[in-house]
Every structure is written in structure tokens, then in C-alpha cells.
Image (tube, helix red, strand yellow):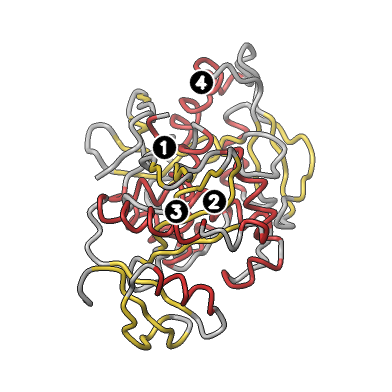
Amino acid sequence: MSNALAPTLHGAGLTLRAPRLDDFEILAAFFASGRSAALGGPVPRDQVWTHFLANAGSWALRGYGFWHIDHDGRFIGRAGIYHPPNWPVPELGNALFDAADEGKGLATKAARTARDGARKLGITSLISSVGDDNPQSRALCERLGAVDEGLYETPFGPIQKFRHFGEAA
Amino acid sequence: MTHLSDTPTLTTERLTLRAQRREDFERYAAFYATERSWGIGGPLDRPSAWRAFAAELGHWIIRGYGFWSVDITASGTTIGQVGLWNPEGWREVEIGWAMFAGFEGKGYAFEAAKAARAYAYDTLGWGPLTSVILPGNTRSEALARRLGARPEGNWTSPRGIETVIWRHPGPNADGAPEARA
């Protein structure tokens, strides 16, 4: 429907598309699992619903948000631009829901497609924040060619900043 | 900016129900910052209000219906919101409403809620709807009664909040006489 707002992107066997209602159960299962710990999980189901809607609404309010990733006809994760109200700048983020999808380069492909999509949406500056406890995320930033800009202050304390493109504000 | 182009615009004698837009957020956040918002999950700080507002727009995208912003047609003043709301885990769709400070007691909420209900019945083809009201929210209870709704039973929401389900008259039963006012 034309309300869906997020443009569909295709790259390397992946489709990045707008969220839709039947994605919710998979998203809720991921956020109930230990795999969501790096994103602040586990998250109760009703809060996942609010975040799910708020991400869809972000596309209307800000013109960007997370895309949902399809691979081989399955909804496997999300990648896109994360910019909650208490976060200083838009940020590239991604998550694969199932450990079985790791190690195949899918996260890198999805993040690269989302990064390039962000440029096309007119975003001028894009970073990723990487926690000490997340070497996978650091490695992904390095594979994408992001530049390590050192620590910066966030609502959750100092975090390592990698810059994908644009100038620091 | 982008907008929700599929959102229908509804008009009543005095009011226009239209798609929410980014410019509505300041009034929304101001409303949610006050105790007046307790009946609909408030008060909320500004980041939480932003998330709630984004979720309301997202409800249109994901469900295809949701809340409208309500304007006084003659002045363009935005006075509140009314809509069709269906969070995951709820039993069924509800008609919800909130009027900002200074716009109660003028029949605006009644007029707007009637229009939203008529849209649900006439355009979407739905049956008798509910409103979920916190016990003691006397203004909302009075509005529900005026709309012809009656308390049907208690219900604990997925967040563990005790509520009362009010049942509106159906599409072909115009409800209590005052609903025709």
C-alpha cells in the first residue's frame, strides 16, 4: 500500500522492504530471545509492538527507519537507520534474528544495502555505535570501510563511534 | 515531507478529522506531559511521547487505520485526536479519544467520535465496536454513555492494567436517543 513509505531495495540476494503486520511474530520471538541482549532485550511483547509501530511511523515522521530483510522468502532480520528520540544522531543498525543465518555475509550485505539506501534517502551523516562487548559489530563496520572516530558520549555513556559517511556535526 | 496519503479525511458539522503529521507533535507532547493524559497511558516524557506518536502513525501503516488529528474546521485549531486503535494482544478494535486542555465540554469529542465510529461501520463494514476505559475516567465514561455505549465487563490489558470494556451500539442500532443528537 502507498502508506508503506519505505522504498524496496534489492542487493545480493536480499530484499530490504517496508515492515508489515505479519512480521510481528518473528520480531516478537527475536526480542523474547537472548539474541536481543545486545539491543537491550529481552523486550516484553507489548513493548515490541510499540517499537514495531514506531519504526513504521518513523518512515512517515523522519523519512527513514529500519527496513525488514527478506532472504529466500524468509523475514530474517532488519537493517536501517536507528534514531530514537533520545539518541544524538541517526545511526546504521542491523540485526539477524537467527544464529543459523550468521557467518554467510548476510549481515554485511544487508548493512551495505541499507547504508547505500540511506544516502539515496538524503541522509548526510551516518555512524554506528559499537559496544566493547560486540566484536561482531566492530568487524562489520570495518568490512564496510567505516572510520573509527573514537569514543563519544551517548545517553548510555561513552561508546565507540564508526563513521560510514558525512562529517561530524 | 512524507505523509500518510491513504488516510481518509472525515468532516463533521464543525470538525475535520485528518491524518496526523509531524507538526502535531508539540501539542501531543504537551498533552502527554500533563496528568490529563492518565486515562490513555500518560503522563509520558518527551522521548516516550515521540515513540507513542510515531507508533500512532505506524498503526495506520501496519493496520490501515488509526488515530486522526481533530481540527476545528473554521479556525484550523487542532484540539485533540480520535480514532480506531487495535494494539496487538487486545481483544478487538476500540474507538479512542483525547481532547487537549480547553476543548472539553463543547461536544467536540462526541462529534469526532461519532464520525470515527460511522467510518468504521459504514466504510470499513465493522460491527459494534468497543471503547476501553480506565475505571474512574468519568469524562470518558460520560462520553461513552452519550455515544450510546454501555459497560460490558472488566478486562486486564496485556500491560496488566485493569480496564472496563464499553460496547457501542452497532451499525444498525443508533443506540441511546442522545446518540442521535
B147, A66: nearer the viewer: A66
Q: Position of residue A118 (x, y in %)?
A: 31, 55
Left or right, B108 with respect to B113, comes to: left
Sequence order check: which comes first, mark 3 or mark 2? 2
Residue sticking out furthest to the top:
B172
Q: Quadrant of residue B141?
A: top right
Query: How busy is the neighbourhood of tag 2: few (under 14 within 10 Å), some, or many (20 plus)?
Result: many
Residue A142 circle label:
none
Residues flagged by tags 4 and 1 on a common chain? no
Q: Which residue is mark 4?
A: B118
Q: Quadrant of residue B7?
A: top left
Q: Which numbered mark, 4 or 1, is in the foreground of this view?
A: 1
Q: Position of residue B94 (x, y in %)?
A: 61, 36
Sequence order check: which comes first, mark 1 or mark 3? 1
Query: Looking at the picture, which amino acid does disc 2 mark?
Result: Phe
Above or below for A144 versus A158: above
Q: Which residue is mark 3?
A: A66
A33, B40: nearer the viewer: A33
Q: Which residue is mark 1?
A: A4
Q: Which residue is mark 2?
A: A52
Q: CA distance from mark 4 to mark 3?
A: 35 Å
Residues flagged by tags 2 and 1 on a common chain? yes
